[in-house]
Image: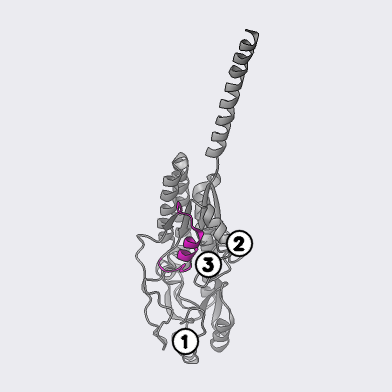
Amino acid sequence: MSRLILCVLFIALAAPFHWTTSVSVSVAAAAEPLNVVVTLPVLKDWVQQVGGTHVRVVSLMTGYESEHTYSPKPSDLVAVRKATLLFEVGAGLEVWVSSLVKNAGNASLQVITTSKDIPLIHDQPESAGEAHGHAHTAGNPHVWLDPSSAATMVQHISNAMAAADPTHAADYRANTTTYLQSLTRVQDETLGLLQQLPNRAVIVHHPAWPYFARRYELRIAGTILTQPGGEPSARHLQALIETIRRDHIRVIISEVQLNQKVPQLLARETGAQIAVLTTLPGGMPGTETYLDMLRYNVLQLASALKQT
């Protein structure tokens, strides 16, 4: 009889312990951050702004590479295998993503194209003497450089994260609202800095800037690079020099991610100034977030244009 009582007591004591352990494991699992991979640092910033502590995000690029020619690393493959969501810009920008996703073999991975629903600008042939060999057949993919397009991309990120992690959907939506308000304020501030300047014609290093130019009412009079990863021909450079002199263009927009040799050559030949900007957060000191990058680019460009 005493043995039976001892057995009953043991079971009674053990059952709550087992239940408590199970609950602890479930709570720990629920608190695990949402694993997200992004192609570009700008997308990482937006995921962090929307997700806060509820997400763990890895950017495949750092901000110093060219998004057109990036080659994924073995660590990228590992990150994609662990991810629930992968955010890309799309529109033909990250041509290397599809093979990376295929090689990762993550059947549950959702790939979200953040440029969806944004009307694309189609590159036009250069008026400065040479066809634009870097034309994007699907449309120019550098949509994030227009803050209005950025707002659409942030909303796509928020919606996908809320669907993948309903427990924190309310937090994601609240954070999105707060961030978009900040984005609107910065856009309004920066618009005022450029729109007051009379001469806003520029030469650009590579065709990343049509959305930025449209938003800030710049005129792109010519583009240096006509082949992805290539060099402009002597004929094209001469045509650009003639355009700069004829139209009194005083500013060349270059990018920290690109070789500065050709912009420096044009500057020496024409007396134009070079404004070195960045297309990605983290490309320059003080550009760690998208809003920082937007302010930096506009301030640098406004400063160069004011001196002309």
Q: Hey, what amino acid is under mark 1?
A: Leu
Give whichever of discs 2 and 3 has the lower sequence position: 2
SS for callout 3? helix
Q: Which residue is mark 2?
A: 286
Inter-mark Cα distance, 2 to 3: 11 Å
Q: Is residue 100 magenta?
A: yes
Badge 3 vs badge 1, beta-carbon distance below 8 Å? no
Q: Residues within 10 Å of mark 2 (few under 14, many from 20)?
A: few
Report the front residue among 168 and 204: 168
The N terminus: image quadrant: top right
Of residue 47 and residue 20, the one placed in the foreground of this image is 20
Query: Do tag 2 and tag 1 residues touch (Cβ < 8 Å)?
Result: no
Q: Relative to residue 67, is residue 49 depicted above or below?
A: above
Distance of mark 3 from mark 1, alpha carbons? 23 Å
Q: Position of residue 138 (x, y in %)?
A: 36, 71
Which residue appears at 50% of the width and 63% of the height? 100
Residue 97 x/y as whole percent: 47, 64
Is residue 262 magenta-colored? no
The image's mark for residue 240 is 1
Q: Which residue is mark 3?
A: 297
Q: Is residue 145 left or right of residue 10?
A: left
SS state under label 1: helix
Looking at marks 3 and 1 on the same chain, the residue that comes earlier in the sequence is marked by 1
Whether residue 263 is visible, yes or no, is yes
**Callouts 2 and 3 close, C-beta under 8 Å:** no
Q: What is the span of residues highlighted in magenta in the rendered image?
A: 91-109
- Type of the residue with mark 3: Asn
> What's the amino acid at mark 2?
Gly
At horizontal 45% and vertical 75% (from top left) the residue drawn is 207
Which of the marked residues, 2 or 1, is nearer the chain's N terminus? 1
The color scheme shown is: one colour
